Image (spheres, helix red, strand yellow):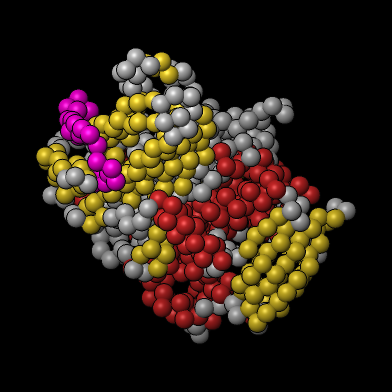
């Protein structure tokens, strides 16, 4: 089980369990509408007290409130609903295994382990300690507001854990209550998040911080309660994933497995969220520019100009047992860096940031041509450099994600369809920015390179017999014909010829690819299709959001609305209307059908949280041109089920605007409610 308290890619708490008279209370309900706070209501099983008093079932109520703000705060309120006094014995058991994230997930076969040190006990706290093979001291500090009557320190050799059991005796009068408060603080080499407020005060503090952060975002509201919840959940989840760095705010990839910077994930999520808050994109760009590759290091796939894939702080990454401290095992983050840089300029007109990042952009372009296209055939390919690197380095990075119909794995170097689209889009956009910066020769060169790539792609990646674009070319330049969602990203990037776009849209919306809940990663007509496979048949919301954007750009608005409705319907079946990282690709059948969760999906996850925002932007037809001071609204197509949508405080360049969209008699009406600053709104019905 992967549950626990995690910090810096390490599990600092592997178990926390209350028992009453040796029995676990029974859960009545639990909710976590706010990402930083949860409440669970529990009741007792029947038991006999030490004094021989029979206590009936469901006569004691437990209210467990838990809050996370660096430290984890827990408050347990116990109420006696018996007509007589009750003496109860409570025990709190905690365990810490200090396992690296990759060890928890079963991805690491440890050759050596660190050392569990003797716990430290004081009247106010118990500290569980572990000295890792990286010589870092990791500590889990259990702060107990009320000292237990007895504290047992335990070691579980079979599971490599240390722990303790705190014993309490509560004297409860009829309708009487007792409260126990504790906090769990993770520390790495003495640095942690010491709790400094009571739970209620901390909750008030976090609510104020959340409202302050939300007030800086674009306001999004729908008259349909379910759609409103869908939008708000995405916004709240993104807020919970914002991590401050010296370069600015960065969206970590997802909880619990990916609470660290990822290049591709951060770039795409920041792109999705530009209408919400452009500063997230600026922080992402500055952070990745700071860690741009500077040398050739096969162990982590680093090359000059290449953009970071992943950076971990766990024991295995710090010792080199896992190649993620940092890792450059990605072929697509580099062109996506350029795409986001351009799109941020389109939203903000911030030429100062473009100038600051321009040297990094030039190095990224050099990487694309020199290292990305190592064989000079015009396509960007990848192959694993380090022994422990990733075999597949696109967004579908599982070992079997690029597979021929006969079941053989594609051999490297592999050129992915969507990556060629990203490179095409990057060069088109960099040509535009080069023109803005007065570098006309470079602009012409990049535009010509993009045009050649588009022509070559539409020849080499199209399979006439199958009637669709292939996922990749393998090392022998053979087409990997398996039907996948990857070519749908070509609609987003614009690399697909206009004449072929209808075939792509038709394929993606066919029953083979479209499940009724979303577009699958692989079609059911592939022998390798598996609706439970990570990348060969499941449904990824972010994948669908990029396809939706592409469908709109090529004029397939009805198809985009169909996929959008499917994602919205799926979200309503998940807790708190939250789209997970992915879910299974089973076909939707009848009105009692429900989407099937994927067993270990991150939730919340960054680019799944960003999906509602990009879907809404696409449906509303928003196209900013901050440099010209214009917001184009092109053929908005808001479905009737979304109700009336109001967008307030939308920032484009030096202006802000409030907009209202409403579906009326088969078309979407747009009204400008307020406009301030240097901004002109052009509505193109």
In front of the other: 271 or 113: 113
- Residue 355: give x, y in percent of width and height: 44, 80
- Residue 427: give x, y in percent of width and height: 51, 67
Q: Residue at x 35, y 26 (%)?
A: 87
- Determine whether 28 is above or below 180 in the image: above
Per the rendered image, the range of residues in magenta is 141-163
- Figure quadrant of the C terminus: bottom right
- Residue 533: give x, y in percent of width and height: 48, 32
Q: Residue at x 44, y 24 (%)?
A: 84
Q: Is 158 colored magenta in this rendering? A: yes
Q: Residue at x 67, y 35 (%)?
A: 516
- Residue 174: give x, y in percent of width and height: 46, 29
In front of the other: 33 or 324: 33
Q: Is residue 391 left or right of residue 585?
A: left
- Quarter residue 457 falls in: bottom right
In front of the other: 327 or 666: 666
Q: Is 229 colored magenta in this rendering? A: no
Whether residue 664 appears in this view of the structure is: yes
């Amino acid at each position: 089980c992967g549950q626990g308290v995690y910090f810096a890619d390490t599990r600092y708490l592997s178990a926390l369990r209350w028992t009453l008279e040796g029995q676990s209370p029974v859960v009545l309900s639990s909710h976590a509408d706010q990402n930083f706070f949860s409440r669970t209501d529990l009741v007792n099983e029947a038991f006999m007290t030490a004094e021989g008093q029979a206590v009936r079932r469901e006569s004691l109520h437990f209210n467990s409130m838990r809050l996370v703000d660096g430290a984890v705060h827990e408050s347990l309120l116990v109420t006696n609903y018996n007509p007589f006094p009750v003496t109860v014995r409570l025990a709190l058991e905690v365990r810490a295994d200090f396992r690296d994230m990759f060890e928890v997930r079963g991805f690491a076969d440890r050759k050596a382990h660190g050392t569990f040190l003797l716990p430290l006990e004081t009247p106010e706290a118990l500290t569980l300690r572990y000295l890792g093979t990286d010589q870092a001291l990791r500590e889990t500090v259990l702060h107990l507001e009320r000292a237990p009557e007895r504290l047992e320190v335990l070691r579980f050799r079979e599971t490599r854990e240390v722990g303790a059991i705190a014993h309490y005796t509560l004297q409860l009068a009829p309708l009487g209550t007792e409260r126990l408060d504790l906090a769990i603080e993770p520390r790495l080499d003495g640095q942690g998040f010491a709790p400094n407020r009571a739970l209620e005060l901390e909750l008030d503090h976090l609510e104020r911080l959340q409202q302050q952060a939300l007030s800086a975002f674009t306001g999004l509201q729908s008259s349909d309660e379910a759609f409103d919840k869908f939008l708000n959940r995405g916004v709240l989840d993104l807020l919970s994933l914002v991590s401050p760095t010296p370069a600015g705010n960065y969206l970590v990839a997802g909880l619990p497995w990916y609470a660290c910077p990822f290049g591709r994930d951060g770039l795409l999520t920041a792109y999705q969220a530009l209408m919400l808050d452009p500063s997230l994109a600026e922080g992402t760009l500055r952070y990745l520019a700071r860690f741009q590759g500077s040398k050739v290091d096969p162990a982590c796939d680093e090359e000059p100009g290449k953009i970071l894939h992943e950076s971990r702080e766990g024991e295995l990454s710090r010792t080199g047992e896992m190649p993620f401290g940092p890792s450059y095992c990605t072929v697509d983050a580099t062109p996506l860096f350029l795409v986001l840089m351009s799109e941020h300029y389109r939203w903000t007109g911030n030429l100062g940031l473009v100038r600051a990042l321009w040297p990094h952009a030039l190095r990224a372009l050099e990487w694309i041509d020199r290292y990305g296209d190592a064989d000079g055939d015009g396509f960007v390919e990848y192959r694993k450099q380090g022994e422990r690197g990733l075999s597949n380095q696109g967004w579908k990075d599982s070992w079997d994600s690029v597979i021929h119909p006969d079941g053989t794995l594609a051999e490297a170097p592999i050129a992915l369809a969507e990556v060629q689209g990203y490179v095409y889009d990057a060069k088109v956009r960099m040509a535009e920015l080069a023109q803005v910066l007065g570098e006309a020769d470079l602009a012409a060169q990049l535009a010509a390179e993009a045009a050649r790539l588009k022509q070559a792609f539409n020849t080499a990646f199209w399979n006439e017999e199958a009637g669709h674009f292939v996922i990749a070319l393998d090392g022998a330049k053979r087409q990997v014909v398996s039907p996948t969602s990857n070519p749908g990203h070509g609609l987003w990037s614009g690399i697909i010829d206009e004449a072929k776009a209808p075939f792509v849209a038709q394929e993606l919306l066919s029953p083979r690819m479209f499940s009724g809940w979303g577009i699958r990663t692989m079609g059911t007509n592939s022998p390798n299709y598996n609706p439970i496979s990570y990348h060969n048949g499941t449904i990824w919301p972010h994948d669908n959001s990029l396809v939706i954007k592409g469908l709109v750009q090529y004029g397939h608005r009805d198809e985009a609305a169909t996929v959008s409705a499917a994602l919205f319907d799926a979200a309503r079946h998940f807790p708190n209307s939250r789209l997970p990282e992915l879910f299974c690709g089973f076909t939707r059948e009848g009105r009692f059908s429900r989407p099937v969760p994927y067993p270990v999906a991150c939730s919340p996850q960054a680019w799944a949280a960003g999906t509602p925002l990009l879907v809404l932007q696409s449906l509303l037809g928003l196209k900013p041109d901050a440099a010209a001071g214009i917001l184009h609204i092109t053929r908005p197509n808001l479905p009737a089920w979304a109700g009336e949508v109001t967008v307030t405080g939308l920032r484009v360049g030096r202006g802000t605007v409030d907009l209202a969209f409403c579906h009326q008699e088969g078309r979407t009406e747009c009204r400008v409610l307020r406009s301030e600053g240097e901004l002109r709104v052009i509505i193109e019905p």
